[in-house]
Image: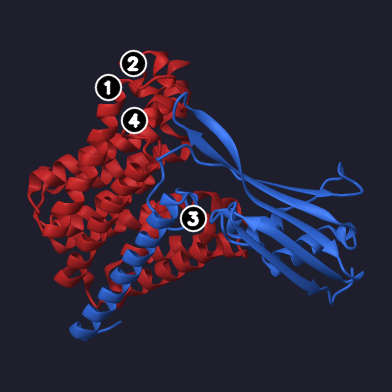
Chain colours: A red, B blue
């Protein structure tokens, strides 16, 4: 059991589990569509995704499940593409091509495609932060620390409230560090470095960022994709953690924290 | 499903190239402050607080009357690309949703929120200003400025009647 929980052997089963986690992240991201009428585009597409995900869990129906899920993804995405968040776009770019493959989990081509995709995404995300200028001067970290939601205020103790008026070096260093890390990971992915320590640090970074932003869908999708790229697959322990975060995300970590405080 | 590895390779390359092109375009638009960094396929979420966009329609003769702008927003990509000029289709939807505006001169103002670094805070910025006048009872002239520099004008005749 312990082997299953933490194994990084990259078996077909653990790669499938990673893909399953990615599918779940998309379903949880579109959770609001649950409230839409079943026969409407977002509502019907969401239930289609759930059906696809359920079928995907049955080995004999895996390919049909994947195709139904992808169809649901497309319909859901195109009904609100102009307001779609990063997560929805990344899911389309990364998960849809798997439907073209007879067995994506054995395909090095698909893993390579994901590696390049994540490489350019990481670099683009880093460049967006440089262009905005809000990380290098620390202003956005300061804003979140004093005006953000419950979890976003976790760095509030590092500088005084005056950081909203004048730059605070600590926030500037945090901002610069975040950009540097994203750019380095992006370049390493493009170069093809798949050292285990990079994966472990990146998963830790993604989980930390998810807790900070109180938004786990994007992080789970990223983690799932990275475990496919690194060919480790998703160990059962990590999968359980990801599902727990997705469930907590429905309520919100900040909300859970407040509820616990009020007990 | 595609069985041929060569075709798979070409297809994946094309998707990757398309993705890369979108990212470069989005970054360029972000440099020019012409796009909401949170939306339209870039990866600029959490580079600044999510900018809320406000659309205000004011009729010349009845400035206090409520105007529903849901369709106008939706058909213009929720103004997430600040330079997208107001489309005829969206104006048609606006008039469908607010019949009383037909024949009525009115203005459309769209604002977004910028992030001021220090002192840190949100500031409003007008990204679209347009006026609608009527050449005949059925034909309007829409003229406006998108993202502060793109002048445009469009004319159309309403073929439907409320």
Quarter of the image for residue B155 reads bottom right
Give the label on residue A170, or none.
1
The x, y position of residue B98, in whole percent, is 83, 57
Q: Which residue is mark 4?
A: A137
Q: CA distance from mark 3 to mark 4?
A: 28 Å
The x, y position of residue A211, in whole percent, is 34, 33
Q: Which residue is mark 2?
A: A159
Locate the N terminus of chain A and report the quarter of the image it occupies: top left
Instruction: Tell me the mark number nearer the camera, choosing from 3 and 4.
Output: 4
Q: Nearer the viewer, residue A150 or A119?
A: A119
Ranked by sequence position, the earlier of labels 4 and 1 is 4
Co-location on one chain, circles 3 and 1: yes
Q: For the residue labelled by badge 4, is the local secondary structure a helix, a strand or a loop?
A: loop
Tag 3 subunit? A
Can residue A211 be seen at all in this image of the molecule?
Answer: yes
Co-location on one chain, circles 3 and 2: yes
Ranked by sequence position, the earlier of labels 3 and 2 is 3
């Amino acid at each position: 059991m312990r082997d299953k929980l933490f194994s990084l052997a990259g078996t077909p089963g653990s790669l499938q589990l990673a893909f399953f986690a990615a599918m779940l992240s998309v379903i949880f991201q579109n959770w609001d569509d649950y409230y839409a009428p079943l026969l409407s585009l977002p509502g019907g597409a969401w239930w289609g995704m759930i059906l696809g995900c359920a079928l995907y869990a049955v080995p004999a129906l895996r390919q049909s499940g994947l195709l139904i899920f992808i169809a649901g993804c497309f319909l859901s995405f195109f009904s609100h593409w102009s307001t779609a968040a990063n997560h929805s776009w990344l899911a389309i770019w990364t998960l849809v091509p798997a439907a073209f493959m007879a067995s994506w989990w054995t395909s090095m081509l698909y893993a390579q495609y994901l590696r390049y995709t994540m490489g350019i995404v990481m670099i683009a995300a880093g460049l967006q932060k440089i262009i905005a200028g809000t990380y290098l001067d620390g202003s956005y970290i300061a804003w979140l620390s004093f005006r953000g939601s419950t979890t976003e205020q976790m760095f509030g103790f590092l500088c005084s409230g005056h950081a909203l008026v004048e730059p605070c070096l600590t926030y500037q260093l945090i901002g610069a560090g975040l950009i540097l890390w994203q750019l380095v990971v992006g370049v390493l992915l493009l170069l093809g470095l798949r050292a285990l320590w990079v994966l472990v640090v990146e998963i830790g970074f993604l989980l930390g960022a998810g807790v900070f932003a109180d938004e786990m869908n994007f992080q789970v999708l990223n983690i799932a994709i990275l475990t496919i790229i690194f060919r480790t697959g998703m160990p059962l322990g990590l999968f359980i953690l990801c599902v727990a975060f997705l469930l907590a995300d429905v309520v919100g970590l900040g909300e859970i924290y407040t509820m616990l405080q009020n007990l | 499903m595609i069985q041929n590895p060569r075709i798979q390779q070409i297809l994946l390359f094309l998707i990757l190239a398309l993705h890369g092109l979108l990212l470069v375009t989005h970054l360029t638009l972000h440099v020019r402050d012409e796009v909401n960094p949170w939306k339209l396929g870039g990866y600029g979420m959490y580079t600044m607080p999510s900018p809320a966009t406000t659309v205000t329609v004011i009729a010349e003769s009845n400035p206090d009357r409520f105007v529903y702008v849901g369709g106008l927003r939706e058909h213009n990509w929720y103004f997430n690309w600040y330079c997208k000029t107001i489309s005829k289709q969206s104006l048609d939807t606006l008039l469908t949703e607010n019949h009383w505006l037909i024949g009525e001169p009115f203005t459309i103002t769209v604002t977004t929120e910028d992030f001021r670094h220090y002192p840190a805070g949100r500031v409003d910025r007008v990204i679209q200003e347009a006026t609608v006048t009527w050449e005949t009872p059925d034909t309007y002239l829409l003229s406006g400025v998108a993202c502060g520099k793109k002048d445009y004008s469009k004319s159309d005749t309403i073929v439907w009647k409320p």
